[in-house]
Amino acid sequence: MNSVARHLLEGYNSLEYILLGDLRDLLEEPLDPQSMRWLSAVLDVLLENIPRQFDLVDDEQGYLHEVIEAQPNWSNEVERLRSEYVQIFRRLHELRQHLDIPEHVASHTRELRHNLRDWMNTFCSLRRHETRLVQTALNLEIGGGD
């Protein structure tokens, strides 16, 4: 990955971290009109940032290329994670669309809060799984022996 792409990726990762913290904080507050505007804004930026981040990695070297390069037989696991990534992104898009329906938000705030927390936990779990997979693939030595 070239230095410009690496710099962009670091920026996307930092922004994602901040936005997830903001989302967590917003979900702890009462969902009044002002916090709903902030919530919408955070979700909008996440919806912009996540695909940019994914596309940058995918275009540069391919999604989890380090894993495939180190452990080619793990390609099914990488594809499973890629598919999960797409599903998680779609779910965020659906949740964001619900915020555009004031009647839905007013009558389902508890459900919305629960669904957004669930989305965030699922997304963070995916990120942890990606990291563990890369670390394991790069540190696993098969064969060895004297």
Image: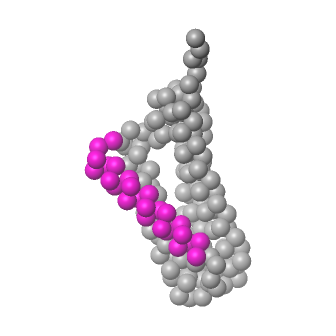
Residue 75 visible, this angle: no
Quarter of the figure that contains the N terminus: top left
**Does residue 124 sit above or below 27 in this rendering?**
above
Report the predominant secondary structure element of the magenta stretch: helix
Q: Nearer the viewer, residue 130 or 144?
A: 144
Residue 61 image offset from top left, x and y in percent:
38, 38
List the single residue furthest toward the bottom: 33
**Residue drawn at (42%, 39%), measured in percent from left and top?**
62
Residue 21 painted magenta = yes
The image's colouring method is one colour
Q: Nearer the viewer, residue 65 or 70?
A: 70
Q: Nearer the viewer, residue 78 or 22?
A: 22
**124 horizontally vs 9: left or right:** right
Residue 2 visible, this angle: yes
**Residue drawn at (50%, 80%), measured in percent from left and top?**
38
**17 horizontally vs 145: left or right:** left
Question: In which quarter of the view is residue 33 placed?
Answer: bottom right
Residue 143 image offset from top left, x and y in percent:
58, 17
Residue 7 painted magenta = yes
Quarter of the figure that contains the C terminus: top right
List the single residue furthest toward the top: 146
List the single residue furthest toward the front: 146
Residue 46 image offset from top left, x and y in percent:
48, 65
Question: In which quarter of the view is residue 132 placed?
Answer: top right
The residue range painted magenta reads 1-25
**139 horizontally vs 49: left or right:** right
